[in-house]
């Protein structure tokens, strides 16, 4: 079993300034914050974390703005699916390549290049829209570019976090990164919707705002230290490095267990988000306003779950913590599916969001903390690949919802999630070695 840790050379980050800042002796909000989230005491990580938030916000805004623009231009709901497919297909094709790039080249350089492509592509759509020349094929091309670029951006982003903070604060830092992603899931679509509603802004203005946000990210990345070159072997070809990464994962029972535990909730649990309109319209008959309440409840719970995991990231028994989160996710889905009235469903959905985000964030941090540094990018690219195929699970879930009902579909998914997580913990010995 390969359970290597980061070498001592990066234990405290990239340089002297990466040594953790000590919380002030006097009690106060700042001291409490640093005790809960010590990674924020590192100036480089703090700049990176805050500096990347505009990028994740812009990504979430793009999902709303691109779909809205496609629908306005074509008056076709089918085109929404085409735009979504244009994002997901490149992720499926290029995620593994992106992982090799994250381990083969300086990670900050990969981030600078990908953020620049985001800015250029989004800026081009903004100019086309403002000039009245925007067509739906421009949006499809933009989506293809975004799906391709994020395949390289996300593995490099996760691996660069490890460089900035070192092994000791890695779990806390990755969990904080996930908290930022969950915050963006809530704030990004809301911000895009508010801007689209302003006649003075419109579609072109929203894309222009996103372009500026990517520019802010690029400026922050320039202020961060260049990536170290340790562990980067360029004598091997990219294909050989990809094979080496996949072979490394196969030889590590812990990583295999964690990746399996990442896939199951994605296929059987997270499709609940797609089925929320079914509950809003058919189950509780609360319409669009009720749908917004359901999605907000899930998003707020997810933000809380990610922050909780960041605070508990250095738990001495992470496998037990993950088991608890996985069981809570599955069982709360069952309870939501059986909720008799809308207010109870909303309250349970907060628990569902909390448990799902906590489980996912913990799985993410454990993958990195149980991998060796030279394979960080490739391990995270395989993990990201599981998210790229998540839309595949939406189709059978939607079919089941039409034929057996939304309650039965969500409830059955929750049972599978809880049973698999409990089964792996009880029957797969390597799971007990997770640290």
Image (spheres, rainbow, N blue to C red):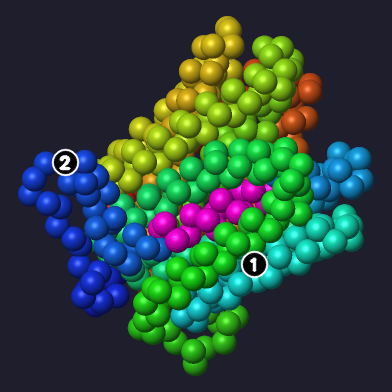
Q: How many marks?
A: 2
The residue furthest front is 200
The residue positioned 48% from the left and 25% from the top of the image is 350
Q: Which residue is mark 1?
A: 119
The residue furthest bottom is 235
Across and down, in percent, residue 230 comes to 35, 83
Up the image or down, 181 lies above or below 216; here it is above
Q: Please indicate whether residue 325 sits to the left or right of residue 291 in the image.
A: left
The residue positioned 41% from the left and 69% from the top of the image is 160
Residue 212: image quadrant is bottom right
Across and down, in percent, residue 15 comes to 25, 76
Local secondary structure at mark 2: loop
Q: Does the stretch in magenta take in 221?
A: no
Q: Please indicate whether residue 34 sits to the left or right of residue 140 in the image.
A: left
Residue 425: image quadrant is top left
Local secondary structure at mark 1: helix
**Range drawn in magenta:** 49-63
Q: Which residue is mark 2?
A: 28
Across and down, in percent, residue 379 comes to 47, 64
The residue positioned 64% from the left and 56% from the top of the image is 209
Up the image or down, 422 lies above or below 143; here it is above
Residue 161 in sight: yes
Up the image or down, 346 lies above or below 366; here it is above
The residue positioned 62% from the left and 33% from the top of the image is 273
Disc 2 residue crowd, few under 14, some 14–19, many 20+, Cα 10 Å = few
Residue 316 in sight: no
Q: Does the stretch in magenta take in 59?
A: yes
The residue furthest top is 340
């Amino acid at each position: 079993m390969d359970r290597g840790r980061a070498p001592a050379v990066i234990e405290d980050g990239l340089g002297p300034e990466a040594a953790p800042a000590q919380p002030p002796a006097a009690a106060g909000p700042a001291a409490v914050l640093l005790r809960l989230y010590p990674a924020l005491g590192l100036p480089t990580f703090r700049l990176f974390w805050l500096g990347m938030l505009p990028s994740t916000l812009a990504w979430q805004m793009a999902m709303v703005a691109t779909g809205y623009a496609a629908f306005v231009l074509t008056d076709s709901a089918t085109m929404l699916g085409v735009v979504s497919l244009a994002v997901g297909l490149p992720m499926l094709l290029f995620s593994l390549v992106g992982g090799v790039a994250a381990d083969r080249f300086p990670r900050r350089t990969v981030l600078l290049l990908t953020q620049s492509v985001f800015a250029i592509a989004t800026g081009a759509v903004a100019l086309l829209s403002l000039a009245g020349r925007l067509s739906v094929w421009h949006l499809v091309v933009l989506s293809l570019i975004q799906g391709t670029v994020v395949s390289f951006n996300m593995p490099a982003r996760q691996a660069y976090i490890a460089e900035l903070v070192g092994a000791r604060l890695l779990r806390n830092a990755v969990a904080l990164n996930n908290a930022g992603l969950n915050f963006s899931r809530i704030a990004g679509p809301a911000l895009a919707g508010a801007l689209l509603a302003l006649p003075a802004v419109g579609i072109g203005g929203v894309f222009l705002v996103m372009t500026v946000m990517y520019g802010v990210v690029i400026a922050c990345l320039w202020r961060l230290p260049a990536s170290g070159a340790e562990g980067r072997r360029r004598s091997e070809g990219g294909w050989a490095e990809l094979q080496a990464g996949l072979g490394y994962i196969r030889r590590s029972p812990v990583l295999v267990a964690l990746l399996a535990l990442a896939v199951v909730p994605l296929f059987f649990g997270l499709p609940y988000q797609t089925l929320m309109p079914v509950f809003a319209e058919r189950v509780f008959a609360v319409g669009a306003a009720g749908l917004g309440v359901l999605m907000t409840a899930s998003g707020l719970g997810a933000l809380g779950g990610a922050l909780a995991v960041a605070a508990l990231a250095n738990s001495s028994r992470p496998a037990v913590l993950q088991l608890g989160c996985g069981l809570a996710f599955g069982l709360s889905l069952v309870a939501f599916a059986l909720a008799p009235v809308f207010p109870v469903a909303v309250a349970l959905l907060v628990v569902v969001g909390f448990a799902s985000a906590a489980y996912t964030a913990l799985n993410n941090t454990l993958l990195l903390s149980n991998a060796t540094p030279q394979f960080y990018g490739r391990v995270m690219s395989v993990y990201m690949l599981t998210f790229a195929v998540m839309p595949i699970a939406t189709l059978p879930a939607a079919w089941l919802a039409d034929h057996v009902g939304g309650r039965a579909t969500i409830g059955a998914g929750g049972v599978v999630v809880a049973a698999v997580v409990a089964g792996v913990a009880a029957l797969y010995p390597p799971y007990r070695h997770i640290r």
